[in-house]
Amino acid sequence: MKNKIIIYSSNNCNYCVKAKVLLAEKGLAFEEINIEVNPEYRDEMLSKSQGRRAVPQIFINDTHIGGYNELLRITVQGRLETYLSDEQT
């Protein structure tokens, strides 16, 4: 199974940039969905994140991680790998 990482983002979002940089530094590919450029995905993001409106909203293999701070926390704690498939680690 290959990892599927999705980041819902918006324009001028520093936390979105930080999340993308962190994932890129880990060598992880991701799909970015900018909800300002593609507003039709806003409802999808809200549904998948249980109503969370802030961006970024990050999902790894359909598991909701949260925003940048949550991504950073699991990375620092060494738990990011637990969300990734065996092929990616």
Image (tube, grey):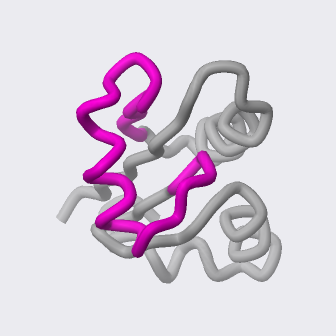
Residue drawn at (29%, 69%) of the image: 62
Residue 42 is left or right of residue 25, and the answer is: left
**Relative to residue 50, is residue 67 depicted above or below?**
above
Q: Quadrant of residue 86?
A: bottom left
Residue 12 drawn at (x, y percent):
71, 21
Residue 3 is left or right of residue 80, and the answer is: left
Residue 48 drawn at (x, y percent):
32, 66
Query: Number of callouts in the render?
Result: 0
Residue drawn at (49%, 45%) of the image: 28
Q: Quadrant of residue 76?
A: bottom right
**Relative to residue 8, is residue 12 depicted above or below?**
above
Residue 58 drawn at (x, y percent):
50, 57
Q: Nearer the viewer, residue 87 or 66?
A: 66
Residue drawn at (46%, 23%) of the image: 36
Residue 52 is left or right of residue 47, and the answer is: right
Q: Nearer the viewer, residue 56 or 86?
A: 56
Q: Residue furthest left?
A: 1
Q: In this picture, which residue range is highlighted in magenta?
A: 30-57
8 magenta-colored = no
Residue 49 is left or right of residue 74, and the answer is: left
Residue 46 drawn at (x, y percent):
38, 59
36 magenta-colored = yes
**Relative to residue 43, is residue 73 depicted above or below?**
below
Q: Quadrant of the N terminus?
A: bottom left
Q: Nearer the viewer, residue 20 or 85?
A: 20
Q: Quadrant of residue 71?
A: bottom right
